[in-house]
Image: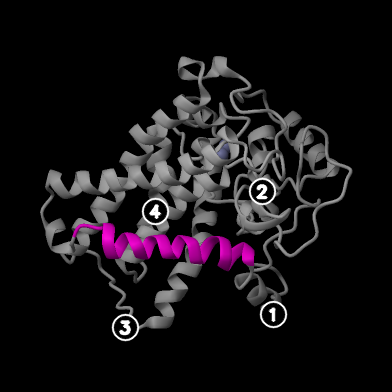
Amino acid sequence: MSGTKFSSYADQDAAQPPPSPPLRAGWAWHPPLPLAPVPVFVWPPRPLVTLRYLLSRAFLGSVLLPFGALAAITWLWLQPALERCAELRADWILQMYARNLGLMLLVAGGLHLFFHTLGRQGKERKFDARALNATPQRFFARSQLLDNMLWTSASGVTVWTAYEVGFMWAYANHLVPFYLDPRAHPVWFVLGFVAVPFFAATHFYFIHRLLHWRPLYRLAHALHHRNDNLGPWSGLSMHPLEHVIYLSSVLVHLVVASHPLHVLFHMQWNTLGAAVSHAGFESLTFRGRPLLMLGSFHHQLHHRHYDCNYGTPFMPCDRWFGTEHDGTEEAMEAVRRRRHSRPARVVS
Ligand SMILES: [Zn+2]
Ligand SMILES: [Zn+2]
């Protein structure tokens, strides 16, 4: 899941030189270790470093501008007029579902085609040396791709659309308590977009800890964890219950002054961003240099080792609560100690 969203956009500024060997065992490529935290919520505060990060290729260039532009395009040209949304009718609801399915096909399908089908970047900046579908017996029709696409389209896009439909209906009926007018409050309007990845990261940490509670894990989250080798369609391949819980972070816009554009941005960040963060590649490169930051090594470590990195690097929740795996052997040892100090649990 998050993230969207994950170390992807954050771990390493694209301007840094490529990592040097030795690689940790089992990886074809990984960023320099230990993973560097996002320098925003750090103590003591480092305002200049924070500002530099917020203007970096990793955040501005790979998160804020592309997802902001997509949300704006959606709002301006692909969103049914709010007046139509005042009444719950199949025509505009199906239009939003078709739009969201199209966006997911474009993003997850495009990434899959480029990286995994056509192999246009070879293994450059690919985390896992294995090709996808290394464990076909886990998936419907023995196909990780088909299985992931089914869960994403049937459940993920449906729940995503349901949240957006609820908000558009509520906005059209003036039921959202705090509306933010961009012309009256342009600075707050922009800051709203900046805040979303950090809020979503915090929400993700806590609901993800909950999803690893054994009954919920077995009921729902194990489905996502069948993907130990990640591709773009793995990002939103989840159980419907997990979709409802995971995407609930958007409800924050009921209590914080927001514009419908913030809602679209938030939802696309959590859904399309998950496809991006699970791409399996750290970045899209041009002449060997990162152009657009994509996948998350931080979250790759979670998929491989389970008991670590429940959050994303946008917020240091894993560091605060002692569940961080920064990719080093010492961190791996700490994960093993935590695992052995608890009763046996089902992990796959
Ligand atoms: Zn995941
Ligand atoms: Zn998990």
Q: In this rendering, does residue 206 appear at all?
A: no
* In the image: residue 26, left or right of residue 84: right
Sequence-first tag of 4 and 1: 1
Q: Is residue 57 above or below residue 285?
A: below
Amino acid on which disc 1 is placed: Leu
* 12 in the magenta segment: no
Q: Give coordinates of residue 99: x percent, y percent.
A: 30, 48
Q: Give coordinates of residue 89: x percent, y percent.
A: 11, 47
- Whole-angstrom CA distance, mark 3 to mark 1, is 28 Å
The span shown in magenta is 57-80
Q: Name the residue under label 3.
A: 183
Tell me if mark 4 has few (under 14), some (14-19) or many (20+) residues whose alpha carbon lies within 10 angstroms of its own: many
- Whole-angstrom CA distance, mark 3 to mark 4, is 23 Å
Amino acid on which disc 4 is placed: Met
- Whole-angstrom CA distance, mark 4 to mark 2, is 22 Å
Amino acid on which disc 3 is placed: Arg
Q: Give coordinates of residue 256: x percent, y percent.
A: 37, 68
Q: Which of marks 4 and 2 is in front?
A: 2
Q: Name the residue under label 1.
A: 48
Q: Do the residues labelled 4 and 2 touch (CB within 8 Å)?
A: no
Q: Which of marks 1 and 2 is in front?
A: 2
Q: What element carries label 4?
A: helix
Mark linked to residue 267: 4
Quadrant in the picture for the C terminus: top right
Question: Which residue in the rendered view is the most extreme toward the bottom?
Answer: 184
Sequence-first tag of 3 and 1: 1
Q: Residue at x 24, y 65 (%)?
A: 176
Sequence-first tag of 1 and 2: 1
Tell me if mark 1 has few (under 14), some (14-19) or many (20+) residues whose alpha carbon lies within 10 angstroms of its own: few
Sequence-first tag of 3 and 2: 3
Sequence-first tag of 3 and 4: 3
Amino acid on which disc 2 is placed: Glu
